[in-house]
Image (cartoon, rainbow, N blue to C red):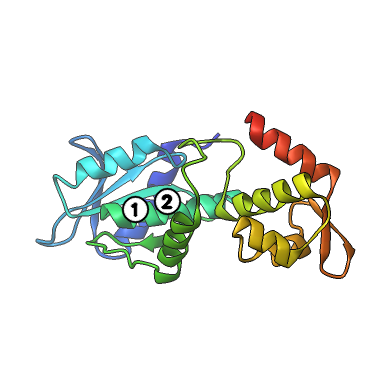
Amino acid sequence: MVKETDLYPPVKAFLEAQGYDVKAEIAGADVVARRADEDPVIVELKARFSLALFHQGVARLAVSDVVYLAVPRGTGRAFHKALAENVKLARRLGLGLMTVRLTDGLVEVHCDPGPYAPRISKPRKARLLREFARRSGDPNRGGTNGRIITAYRQDALRCAGHLAAHGPCRGAAVKAATGVDRATTIMRDDHYGWFERVEKGVYTLTGAGRTALISFETGAP
């Protein structure tokens, strides 16, 4: 089982190689490094990513602007995903983040401490605003862990409801009756398995579509 103390020798050697004098457990900080009259470098060690690690790092910013978090370097997709997300968080908080490969003591710095201003993604913002504008009402519960009713799903349900009431119809007729401009495309693409083409341009509702309508009306997942 990995312990925080396993990280100290590689981190100490890494900092000493850059000309720092390094000492452990100084005034509550796991690692403190000094080089000439520069601000002290503080490193907080943890056996894994945790909220407590970030709490400690933020607390150390009251002492120095140069604060790093250090965890053992893992393997596999889950670890690399966690690493990427925690690097983003560290940057947001003005913290540095390093990993230690315990098999050979390799220390890798993934981000350095300092001010960080995230860039707004215009395409993501546009998608968010487009979905907000197109969604009818507020059909979901914030924090839901179940079915999400998107604007696309709402349109598909409108098409399904019309077919349930009127039987097989042409896409143009469904569009005119429901106001769903993309009715034909939705029924043709059939992402949910609700629609079946009976002839060119004409669609009917499948059993799965009828079940979906009942589920939506009753609020079942």
How many C-alpha atoms fall within 10 Å of the one at disc 1: few (<14), some, or many (≥20)?
many
C-alpha gap between disc 2 and disc 1: 6 Å
Dividing the picture into quadrants, the one containing residue 217 is: top right
Q: Residue at x 65, y 29 (%)?
A: 218
Nearest the eye: 176 or 52: 176
Disc 1 residue type? Ala
Nearest the eye: 136 or 21: 136
Nearest the eye: 80 or 122: 122
Residue 197, image x, y percentages: 86, 61
Residue under pointer 1: 90
Q: Quadrant of the C terminus?
A: top right
Q: Residue at x 14, y 57 (%)?
A: 39
Disc 2 residue type? Asn
Q: Secondary structure at mark 2?
A: helix
Residue 187 shows up from this direction: yes
Q: Residue 37, relative to residue 28: is it above or below?
A: below
Q: Is residue 58 left or right of residue 212?
A: left
Q: Residue at x 61, y 60 (%)?
A: 180
Nearest the eye: 68 or 147: 147
Q: Residue 34, relative to residue 2: is it above or below?
A: below
Residue 84, image x, y percentages: 47, 57
CB atoms of marks 2 and 1 within 8 Å:
yes
Dividing the picture into quadrants, the one containing residue 207 is: top right
Q: Quadrant of the N terminus?
A: top right
Dividing the picture into quadrants, the one containing residue 165 is: top right
Residue under pointer 2: 86
